[in-house]
Image (cartoon, rainbow, N blue to C red):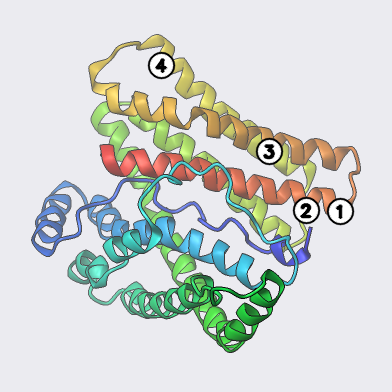
Amino acid sequence: MNPKWLVPISLVLGLGLLGVAGATKPLQYAQLWLDQRDSPSTATASALAPLIDCVNRIDRDTRLAYYRLHAASPQAPEHDNFGDRNEPEPRIIQASVCSSLYTLKLERQQPGSPLIGLASVYAYRLQKLTSLTDKITAMPPPDGVPQGVQQMVAEAMNKPLLAQLVDVGEDYLAVSTGLRNQLEREDLSVRPAQLARIEARMGRDLHWHVLNYMIAARHAVDRIERDMRDASLTPQTVADLAAAVQAAADNGNAYKRLHPGNPRDEEASNLWYTISPAAEAYLAALTTLRQDWLAHAAPPQLSEDYYLVTRRYDALLSYYNRLARNAF
């Protein structure tokens, strides 16, 4: 595996543990008012949600497309079995969830947030990159030209655009990474408070177990990425993280067995059922990484195992996010 994919290729970064809100200005302001009456953490999560939706649904695939288009080898990451692959065309989603409206609630709730400026620059860079890549990938060769010549003509026509893509793409990746990092810090800071609020209101019901599992899954991929970057990751750390993820899943399944058919759990039960195959695949990837490491597998194999962990987490999150934003 190309070493460049070793550095943080969890392209979704685990954002968006909760659903998102509507996009129109009156609805966003009204919902923010209701969220503020619930709790500060709810209001913060609600204000971050439209940005998270944009990152989850657009930035992931934009980065993947850029890597594949720009890579010198066929080793750029491929799509995994994401739960949102049958959504509308990406440009339709982009216009819907990455528009100028996506910072409205954040501007109202936290007018001094650095995310507002980052999100504005991100939207500009996104539009610039996608406009350019659309020209490259959609450029048809002239009719009536032999196939071999068609390839040469297409390459000649695309050459100046590909040259622009280097600078435009790197600018996009830089602001994308900055937005993700800041969004990650702010998003994760409210999750413990939200988990505690669910427990205070409804006890450790299935809603609590779903969110607790997603936090455990996110913590595992976070820790693996950080320790991999610092060259401090060990098989025992991977084993401990996998055990924590497994425990969160087991606790959720135990709750379901003890409380079958609870009407209050209907939406959460559907969500738990939907993410279960992806959750099992994620846990299997964690287990494979640990087993191959203990078996002294070659570095390229461990690199592939690491990549599989991040990719399986992204797939898990895509199933969660799609259903969560429709259900909650």
Look at mark 1 in the image and give the residue it sits on. 299
What's the amino acid at mark 2?
Ser
C-alpha separation, residue under disc 4 versus residue under disc 2: 36 Å
Name above or below for residue 162 compared with residue 252: below
Q: Is residue 269 left or right of residue 248?
A: left
Residue at horizontal 30%, vertical 54%? Answer: 45
Q: Is residue 22 left or right of residue 192?
A: left
C-alpha separation, residue under disc 4 versus residue under disc 3: 25 Å
What kind of element bears circle 1?
Answer: helix
Q: Is residue 319 left or right of residue 299?
A: left
What kind of element bears circle 2?
Answer: helix
What kind of element bears circle 4?
Answer: helix
C-alpha separation, residue under disc 1 versus residue under disc 4: 40 Å
Which is more foreground, mark 4 or mark 3? 3
What's the amino acid at mark 4?
Lys
| Disc 1 packing (10 Å; few <14; some 14–19; many ≥20) | few
Residue at horizontal 72%, vertical 43%? Answer: 237
Q: Is residue 72 left or right of residue 203?
A: right
Look at mark 2 in the image and give the residue it sits on. 303
Where does the image place residue 241, in percent across and percent down from the top left? 64, 39
Look at mark 4 in the image and give the residue it sits on. 256
